[in-house]
Image (cartoon, rainbow, N blue to C red):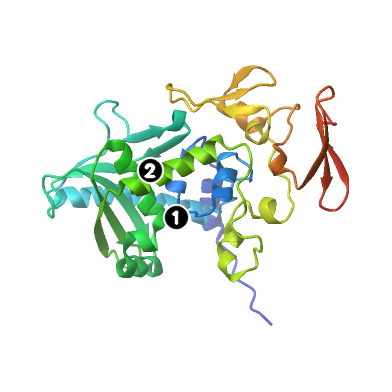
Amino acid sequence: MPEIPAPIPHTVDAIYRAYENRPRYERSYLGASTFGTECDRAFWYGFRLAAEPEALTGQKLRLFETGHREEARIIDDLRAAGLTVEETDPATGRQWEIVAIGGHMRGHLDGIATGVIEAPKAEHVLECKTHNEKSFRALVKDKVEKSKPGHYAQMQLYMHHRGIGRALYVAVNKNTDEIYIERIAYDMAYALRLMARAERAITAEKAPPRLHDDPSAKAAFACQWCSAFQICHAGQFARRNCRTCLSSTPVIDASDRGAWRCERWNKELNWREQQAGCASHLYLPSLVPGEQVDASEKDRTVTYRLANGETWIDGRAA
């Protein structure tokens, strides 16, 4: 008979609940830190707000904050070693930022470093990360590009948009406080491929093909951890919001505001409206787990035959 787990002390539980009660943050843009997945479909689902945000425990939220707090310590360490680190853009007084594709893709740098001992005159994009023991050992063995492709992509995008030819990757082992540093060279061809991928995700009105049709296959192990698994493989409907509606479109212009426009109501949508949606919502067809069989422009309905054979009419309730 398995042992009954010990109860969590009330004070510990209160600490975790305090983290869980904080307002949840959801990105309105495609973040440079989200390029770690090789699945374009998951990438597109994320930008379209198709899946519910992951319900994070207080312990995991605290862990994320620990990583964020470590950035300041790493920067202090670099300065103590003689490097110069600028954490904010002098032109704005805010954190260094990259903005692209009409403001629908953004990223935020940990800083820009100069005086790196191995290359004192070169500017470096600075990226600070924390790792557990297993992840850290893989990093030391295989380097950033192989062991952490998402981190590598993030730095390539930063270098590409800031016009800087090197990045300084500083990693800390959370178990031992061991530090690992790697200098990364800018790869223009790689960065341009990332930008093309981002543009496809932002402009596509249809979900890209699945990376794996059989999520139980050995090669598809990452599918099990995807927040959109139920939508992609189990026939679950996506969230109802403006970004899953066929009436709304991302605006790509020189303003870089990351705006969205609703053709149904002929208006620009603010972030809260995008998240909420409205009663006139009609799903993008590729988000419906079935085959479209009819549509009525007059009634503003679209009819589907679902995978179980039932007929479902989108827009009928409205």
State the image coordinates of residue 209 (x, y, percent, origin top left).
62, 51
Quadrant position of residue 114: top left
Residue found farthest to the bottom: 1
Q: Sequence order check: which comes first, mark 1 or mark 2?
A: 1
Name the amino acid, label 2: Leu
Toward which corner of the image does residue 161 lie, by quadrant?
A: top left
Foreground pick, 57 / 238: 238
Picture coordinates of residue 5, whole percent (x, y): 61, 71
Tell me the residue that label 1 is attached to. 63
301 with respect to 69 (left or right) = right
Marks 1/2: CA–CA distance: 33 Å
Numbered badge on residue 314: none
- Residues 146 and 176: in front is 146
- Give the mark toward the camera: 1 or 2: 2
Element marked by disc 1: helix
Taking the spot 15% from the left edge, 47% from the top edge, the residue there is 83
Q: Quadrant of the N terminus?
A: bottom right
- Image position, residue 303 (x, y; %): 83, 37
Depth check, front residue: 25 or 103: 103
Q: Secondary structure at mark 2?
A: helix
Three-letter amino acid code at disc 1?
A: Leu
Residue displayed at 35% across by 59% down: 145
Q: What number is the disc on residue 192?
A: 2
Looking at the image, can residue 26 be seen? no
Q: Residues within 10 Å of mark 2 (few under 14, many from 20)?
A: some
Residue closest to the eye, 156 or 79: 156
